[in-house]
Amino acid sequence: MFNKRLFKQQLKENLFNKRRLIILNEDTFEETFSLKLTLMNVFVVLGLGAIFIIFITTFIIAFTPLREFIPGYSSSKLKRDATELALKSDSLTKALEHNEAYIKSLKKVLTGELEFAKFNKDSILSSTEQKQIEGDLSASKEELELRKRISKEEQSYQKKK
């Protein structure tokens, strides 16, 4: 117990004892610079300096083009190009579907399965759009199971009240 207390007192004295840092000219032994310090001041200044350097480095890497050199980060130009290409491919896919529907309808007219009077390009395109919308709104098996499970939980919750 006494040793711990003695150790703490010595540590406190060492941390807060004033010391002098003197820089001398080697040839003339003239004092060029003098500074009074404590070990605690040195630790505080070094700690704050390290935190400042870490903050500045993180800021430089995160908000400048240097982040592109870190694995896992992609360039903003690459992201922009990928988005643009995805939009183009989507529009090309839709145009291809419209053209295929138009060609199928033309084949029906040429083979005599459909009357020419009922044939209209706009009606063909609107029918393909309706098919796409209808396909997107149908519920999957998992969704139906989830709906059933939620309704059962709601009923059991209302019974508990």
Image (cartoon, grey):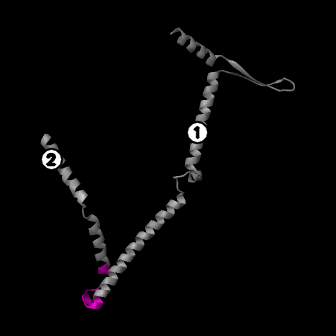
Q: Is residue 114 magenta?
A: yes
Question: Label 1 amino acid?
Answer: Ile
Q: Residue at x 23, y 60 (%)?
A: 141
Tally the marks: 2
Residue 103: x and y, percent? 34, 84
Magenta part of the chain: 109-124
- Per the rendering, the mark at residue 22 is none
| Tag 1 residue | 54
Q: Is residue 60 left or right of residue 97?
A: right
The correct choice, above or below, for 89 with respect to 49 in the image is: below
Q: Quadrant of residue 130?
A: bottom left
The residue nearer to you, when weighing 153 against 128, is 153
Residue 14: x and y, percent? 63, 17
Badge 1 marks a residue whose secondary structure is helix
Q: Residue at x 57, y 14 (%)?
A: 7
| Tag 2 residue | 155
Main structural element of the magenta stretch: helix, strand or loop? helix
Question: Label 2 amino acid?
Answer: Gln
Residue 109: x and y, percent? 28, 89
Q: Is residue 103 left or right of residue 73?
A: left
Circles 1 and 2, Cβ within 8 Å, touching? The answer is: no
Q: Is residue 127 left or right of residue 80?
A: left
Q: Residue furthest right?
A: 28
Tell me how far mark 1 sits from mark 2, CA to CA.
56 Å
